């Protein structure tokens, strides 16, 4: 590219700094991961002592290993070109579908949901991979057919078929929380692709019928709804124990919290304190300030995704970013709504924060994809090329110091 062409490209870029999206994602993910790692260490120490016979770091080390793998995936993924993510979308989705079928056949159940595959001493949740694969595939499929989404016939396309298959396989394992997140992803992708509102209304009506059918099909789901609607009448030592102690944890934290590692609810009072209800432990140990920091971090991710949708010229990036953003931010909203009592217990973790290797690895990989998109935002390649790397700046400072 000539200098004149480079200046023309830069001048045609949207207003504002083209690297803001990239750094919003980097700072937000760092905040979430660091706080999450600290709270996972705190909330799993007692359970590790019981399981390992004296080592309080057993479960924390598993999370740390997952963090290392996920960080590698983020760094490598952020350097990949957009064309790479287009090429791997279909194979990744196909692999995730095969793994979801394997879950149905030989998977392990936990909390009433069958969504785990055991690989040696560890378990893996293929539905996490399906989120990433589906978001990328929706980007590929809808970017091609987005101008034909005005008729009902055009909606019966590869994107819709793939979404229905993934959703059916997840629901086959009775994981309604993950299914809800997938619905949010699909809705966001189709919204950005430009599907008419009348079809959203029709899909919403069908979805409500399906939700009522699923609630009546499972006893555990119905009991969770009943606990949420009639919390004042349920057993505080039984069905209401989790939501009640989650509220107590948030309340006892106050403004500044009890301090790192000082949670009382983690000592067997709050079930799955390291995963589904980790936001309550954050509130207990770091107070209102800590919970607001988490909300700000997820807000930064939402702003970054919105910038990608509005500023990027590639329809694939716009649609895939919308799906990935709906996954990360939407799932966070569901998890937090459960903890504060605005929704029944769904069993979905807090992305990038909760304990769980497969969730952390794939969530960091998704952030890496978004950062890859951000590096190709109009004007961003030129801005990054004009800035020396951190390594070069470090050597330059050392050299100046020696000369001085």
Image: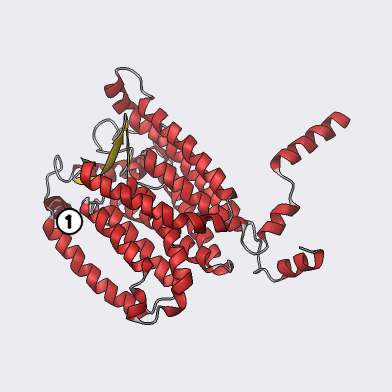
* Coloration of the structure image: secondary structure
Q: Quadrant of residue 9?
A: bottom right
Q: Looking at the rendering, in which quadrant would you find the C terminus?
A: top right
The residue under the point 15% across, 43% down is: 236
Q: Residue at x 80, y 68 (%)?
A: 4
Q: Position of residue 116 (x, y in %)?
A: 28, 42
Residue for point 55% across, 64% down: 307
Would residue 235 be found to the left or right of residue 23 on screen?
left
Please name whichever residue, 80 or 195, is drawn nearer the observer in this view of the structure: 80
Q: Measured along the vertical axis of the image, is residue 288 above or below residue 45?
A: below
How many C-alpha atoms fall within 10 Å of the one at disc 1: few (<14), some, or many (≥20)?
some
Frontmost residue, 69 versus 235: 69
Q: Is residue 255 visible?
A: no
Q: Is residue 276 left or right of residue 20?
A: left
Q: Residue at image x 76%, y 65%?
A: 6
On the picture, is 49 further left or further right than 380? left
Q: Which residue is mark 1?
A: 225
Q: Is residue 345 visible?
A: yes
Which is nearer the eye, 22 or 375? 375
Indicate the quadrant containing the N terminus: top left, top right, bottom left or bottom right: bottom right
Percent of width and height locating residue 186: 37, 64
Q: From what the image shows, is residue 359 above or below residue 330? A: above
Quarter of image, res 193: bottom left
Hey, which quadrant is residue 395 in on the image? Answer: top right
Instruction: Describe residue 325's horizontal placement relative to residue 6 as left or right.
Output: left
Foreground of the two, 41 or 261: 41
Q: Residue furthest right?
A: 403
User: What secondary structure is marked by label 1?
Assistant: helix
């Amino acid at each position: 590219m000539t200098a004149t062409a480079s200046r023309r490209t830069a001048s045609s870029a949207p207003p504002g700094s083209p690297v803001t999206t990239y750094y919003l994602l980097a700072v937000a993910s760092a905040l979430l991961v660091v706080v999450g790692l600290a709270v996972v260490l705190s909330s799993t120490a007692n359970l590790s002592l019981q399981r390992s016979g004296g080592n309080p770091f057993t479960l924390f080390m598993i999370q740390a290993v997952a963090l290392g793998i996920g960080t590698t995936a983020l760094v490598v993924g952020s350097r990949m070109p957009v064309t790479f993510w287009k090429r791997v979308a279909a194979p990744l989705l196909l692999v995730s579908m095969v793994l979801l079928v394997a879950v149905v056949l030989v998977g392990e159940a936990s909390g009433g949901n069958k969504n785990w595959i055991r690989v040696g001493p560890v378990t893996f949740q293929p539905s996490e991979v399906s989120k990433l694969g589906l978001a990328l595939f929706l980007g590929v499929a809808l970017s091609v057919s987005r101008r034909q989404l005005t008729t009902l016939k055009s909606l019966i396309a590869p994107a819709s078929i793939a979404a229905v298959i993934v959703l059916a396989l997840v629901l086959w394992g009775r994981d309604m929380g993950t299914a809800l997140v997938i619905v949010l992803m699909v809705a966001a992708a189709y919204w950005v692709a430009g599907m008419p509102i009348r079809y959203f209304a029709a899909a919403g009506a069908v979805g409500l019928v399906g939700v009522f059918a699923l609630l009546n099909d499972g006893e555990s789901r119905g009991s969770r709804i009943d606990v949420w609607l009639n919390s004042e009448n349920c057993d505080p030592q039984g069905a209401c124990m989790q939501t009640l102690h989650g509220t107590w944890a948030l309340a006892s934290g106050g403004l500044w919290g009890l301090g790192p590692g000082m949670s009382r609810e983690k000592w067997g009072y709050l079930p799955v304190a390291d995963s589904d209800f980790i936001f309550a432990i954050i509130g207990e140990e770091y107070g209102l300030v800590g919970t607001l920091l988490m909300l700000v971090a997820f807000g930064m991710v939402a702003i970054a995704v919105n910038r990608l949708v509005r500023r990027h010229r590639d329809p694939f990036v716009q649609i895939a970013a919308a799906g990935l953003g709906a996954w990360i931010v939407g799932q966070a909203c569901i998890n937090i709504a459960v903890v504060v009592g605005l929704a029944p217990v769904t069993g979905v973790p807090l992305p990038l924060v909760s304990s769980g290797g497969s969730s952390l690895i794939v969530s960091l990989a998704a952030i890496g994809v978004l950062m890859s998109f951000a590096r190709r935002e109009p004007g961003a390649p030129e801005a990054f090329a004009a800035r020396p790397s951190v390594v070069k700046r470090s050597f330059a400072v050392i050299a100046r110091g020696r000369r001085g």
